[in-house]
Image (cartoon, rainbow, N blue to C red):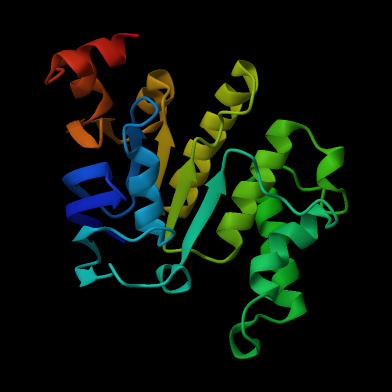
Amino acid sequence: MYIDIDELAKEFGTSRALHPVSLSIPAGALVALLGPSGSGKTTLLRILGGLEFPTSGRVLFDGKDATGMSVQERRAGFVFQHYALFRHMTVFENIAFGLRARKRRERPGEAEIGRRVNRLLDLIRLPNIGGRYPSQLSGGQRQRVALARALAIEPRMLLLDEPFGALDAKVRKELRQGLREIHDTTGLTTIFVTHDQEEAMELADLVVVMSMGRIEQIGKPADIRSRPSSDFVRAFTAA
């Protein structure tokens, strides 16, 4: 799915979180929204997922206006920094949750749910942990399970908000590689928020540098590094 963001703006009372921004995201791209705290990157991600609605502007999915679509209609898979796994459920049950919560006519049978969950456990390279509980997993394992749960619903796009921020440097590096491999396997349009320029440059096909609710520069990682378009971009990506 390709995404067009057309003059999107967002205000919270008298505060403007997003000035009008425009961006085209190619189908199947892995895109980083990169910037410091308060730059508007999480607000933009939440608007794409339907968790917030813009004050003005439009979002288009495959050319269709999706601005007023509900979360369910958008079919986005979400991964957040703090996992949000259900502690009282096993790994298997956590991954299956979104499928079992569907309306009866849309819900797969238990055998199909089992096949999907086991395929996803293989995909995240944790094939034997379905019977464990989140408290029995490391931080990196919990984040992999959160990713599998997001993929279980067969989303149209994958949205990740600082997905590795709560992990130590060694685990972050391992999971970055894992995310890249999963993205390449699934082919999903994937957008992730980060303040870590190394993470953005290593992972993304396209980097969107943001500051103060505005887009400063859009480009491939090598172009952002070699040809920064402003003093802000130059300083931020060099940090």
Look at the picture and state if 136 lies above or below 232: below
Where is residue 197? Give x, y as percent. Answer: 37, 20
Where is residue 208? Give x, y as percent. Answer: 26, 34
Q: Quadrant of the N terminus?
A: bottom left
Q: Residue at x 24, y 58 (%)?
A: 55
Where is residue 3? Give x, y as percent. Answer: 26, 57
Q: Residue at x 83, y 57 (%)?
A: 89
The one of 119 and 149 positioned closer to us in this rendering:
149
Kindly indicate the quadrant of the structure image that contains residue 30.
top left
Look at the picture and state if 109 lies above or below 220: below
Whether residue 78 sits left or right of residue 85 in the image: it is: left
Where is residue 152? Give x, y as percent. Answer: 61, 62
Whether residue 51 sits left or right of residue 138 in the image: it is: left
Whether residue 158 sits left or right of residue 150 in the image: it is: left
Q: Quadrant of the C terminus?
A: top left
Q: Residue at x 58, y 31 (%)?
A: 175
Q: Residue at x 35, y 36 (%)?
A: 32
Look at the picture and state if 66 lies above or below 228: below
Q: Residue lying farthest bottom?
A: 105
The one of 10 and 173 positioned closer to us in this rendering:
10
Numbered disc total:
0
